[in-house]
């Protein structure tokens, strides 16, 4: 089974466009640092990984909030629903009120359109 670092690195190294190996290393190290700092880390079926970092919103401290970043799926498994299933599992385990998604808009928008749980009343 691949580690969170390996999943993040391989996904971003293969992404192309804006990303190169320097970015892949940065995202992989970012994930490792978030895990060391206590963020919720989930590996889904050994092919997808994400970190959910708890945050407090000053105007609404009663809400259970997280920032989702980084999220990565190994290249050969992308477009097959692994990220969606990872998010569903994480959301059920975290029981969050709000999840803010950070990422490349051209990629993240597709994922967020498919998900409707960003604020639960």
Image (cartoon, rainbow, N blue to C red):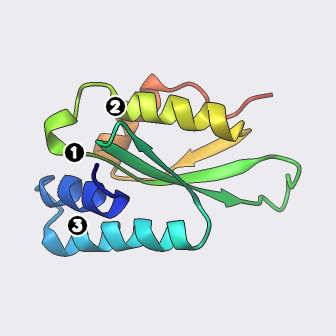
Q: Which residue is mark 3?
A: 24
Q: Which residue is mark 2?
A: 82
Mark in the foreground, 3 or 2: 2
Q: Secondary structure at mark 3?
A: helix
Q: Is residue 36 above or below residue 69?
A: below
Residue nearest the observer in this picture, 98 or 81: 81
Residue nearest the observer in this picture, 93 or 84: 93
Q: Residue at the spot x=28%, y=42% of the render? A: 47
Q: Residue at the spot x=13%, y=37% of the render? A: 76
How far apart are labels 2 and 1 at the CA level? 10 Å
Residue nearest the observer in this picture, 31 or 112: 31
CB contact under 8 Å: marks 1 and 3? no
Q: Residues within 10 Å of mark 1 (few under 14, many from 20)?
A: many
Across and down, in percent, residue 118 comes to 62, 35
User: Closer to the N terminus: mark 1 or mark 3?
Assistant: 3
Image-based side of 56 in relation to 111, left or right:
right
CB contact under 8 Å: marks 2 and 1? no
In this figure, what is the number of numbered marks? 3
Q: Is residue 121 above or below residue 54?
A: above
User: Closer to the N terminus: mark 2 or mark 1?
Assistant: 1
How far apart are labels 3 and 2 at the CA level? 20 Å
Q: Secondary structure at mark 1?
A: loop
Residue 74 tag number:
1
Q: Residue at the spot x=32%, y=67% of the render? A: 28
How far apart are labels 1 and 3 at the CA level? 12 Å
Which picture quadrant has residue 46?
top left
Mark in the foreground, 1 or 3: 1
């Amino acid at each position: 089974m691949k580690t969170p670092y390996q999943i993040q690195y391989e996904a971003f190294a293969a992404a192309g466009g804006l990303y190169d190996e320097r970015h892949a290393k940065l995202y992989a190290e970012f994930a490792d640092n978030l895990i060391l700092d206590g963020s919720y880390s989930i590996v889904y079926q050994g092919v997808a990984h994400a970190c959910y970092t708890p945050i407090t919103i000053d105007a609404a401290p009663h809400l259970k909030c997280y920032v989702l970043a980084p999220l990565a799926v190994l290249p050969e498994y992308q477009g097959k629903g692994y990220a969606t299933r990872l998010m569903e599992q994480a959301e059920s385990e975290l029981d969050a009120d709000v999840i803010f998604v950070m990422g490349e808009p051209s990629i993240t928008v597709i994922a967020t359109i498919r998900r409707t749980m960003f604020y639960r009343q």
